[in-house]
Amino acid sequence: MQADKYKNYTATDFLKDKDFIRWQLFNDGKDTLFWKDVVEKYPGSRLPIEEAMELYKENIRFNDFSMSGLEISELVISLQNQIRYTKKRRIQRRIVLSISAVAASMAIILSLPLFFNNNNNDIPDISTFAQALPGNNDDLYSSDTKLIVSENNTVTLNNNESSIQYEEDGIKADDNLILKEEVAPYNQLITPYGKRSVITFSDGTKAWVNAGSRLVYPTEFSKEKREIYVDGEIYIEVSEDRKRPFIIKTSQMDIKVLGTKFNVLAHEADQTNSVVLLSGSVSISSNALKKHVILKPDQMYSNVEGLQTVESVDASIFILWTKGLYQFESEKLGNIITRLERYYGIRIECDPDISGLRCSGKLDLKDDMTKLMDELSRALAITYRKNSDGSYIINAKH
């Protein structure tokens, strides 16, 4: 800990600081000396520290249960994540309301003694957890895939296509072996633009994760159900288990299955999401749906800016990206560009006047971007140039 960073902290800032919260939770002697030093070095911090301590004492109460130090620490970590998420969504209106929200959040979290307990039956709703995690778009532009197995343990994977497998005694992630004892109940896999991943969950279910995607999931599924959260695109082959449905949650919909193969496209940043079924059956529900939609093989459910449709398709086309191919039919150039940006991790600027041009074809994603640009410029009346930083600009051909 460095005292300098607390020089201009407000009471709200202190309530968001994990070291301050730890001091309030455990009253460690070394921490007390540190904070005493902060006040002596920066007298102006005395009042906001006292205000934060008072707010903490007045609003935070432990319920009557027994918790280990580790459990409490992990609860605090979750609180920090919720605070950062709230700040990102800009729903804090006034400092007084912000402080109350912090206190209320901690009170709620502390009322769940098994929030991070290894008994996964008691893990809370995965959507709540996933959406409370801090959003950081920089992770999607990283050069490495990130497997976050605990708050203090992030494994970086630099292969273009990483393999993660959950086994009884631990996790194999490319050339890394992570012991089960080092893993928190919830994990997060962030596959940045330009990278892909294949993950095998604890029940044997296998998912191919496309570029620019984020998955949140338990290290072990509960006895009643299997749930994961997806922000991005995956193709998944679900291990059949009639006693435990497999549920994929996104910001827009829930997809429930027993054993099947299907593709999910659900980037939170997009106004389009879809489910394409290859085999089996799936049930789709969302706030926008008045009833569940049941898909049959070779059907696609899509929600484009609120317009929901179910249509017959050749489902195999929609998973060609797992084999390094991209096939499209009468697709808008803007949508093609977005998928190429994510797959290659390269910025492409397209003139808005031509983004609505439609094109059909198949691209080999194993080719470099310049070759793909050549193919698109032959199919459409467009021209392109490559910048010194590796990005591209597409304009109409005159």
Image (spheres, rainbow, N blue to C red):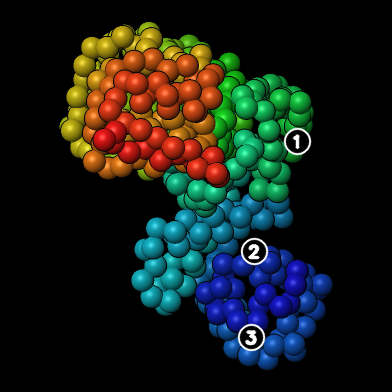
Say which element carries label 3: helix
Which mark, residue 181? 1
Name the mark nearer the viewer: 1 or 3.
3
Mark 2 vs mark 3, CA separation in Å: 17 Å
Which of marks 3 and 1 precedes in the sequence?
3
Q: Are marks 2 and 1 in contact (CB under 8 Å)?
A: no
Q: Is residue 203 visible?
A: no
Q: Is residue 196 visible?
A: yes
Please state which of residues 222 and 374 is positioned toward the viewer in this rendering. Answer: 374
* Residue 357 at x, y percent in the picture: 24, 30
Which of marks 1 and 2 precedes in the sequence?
2
The residue singled out by tag 3 in the image is 45
State the quadrant of the C terminus: top left
Residue 39, picture quadrant: bottom right
* Residue 246 at x, y percent in the picture: 44, 22
Q: Categorize mark 2 by other alpha carbons within 10 Å: few (<14), some (14-19), many (20+).
A: some
User: Residue at image x 55%, y 44%?
Assistant: 388
Query: Is residue 257 rendered to the left or right of residue 74?
Result: left
User: Residue at image x 66%, y 48%?
Assistant: 151
What kind of residue is marked 3?
A: Ser
Please state which of residues 345 and 85 is positioned toward the viewer in this rendering. Answer: 345
Q: Categorize mark 3 by other alpha carbons within 10 Å: few (<14), some (14-19), many (20+).
A: some
* Residue 247 at x, y percent in the picture: 42, 26
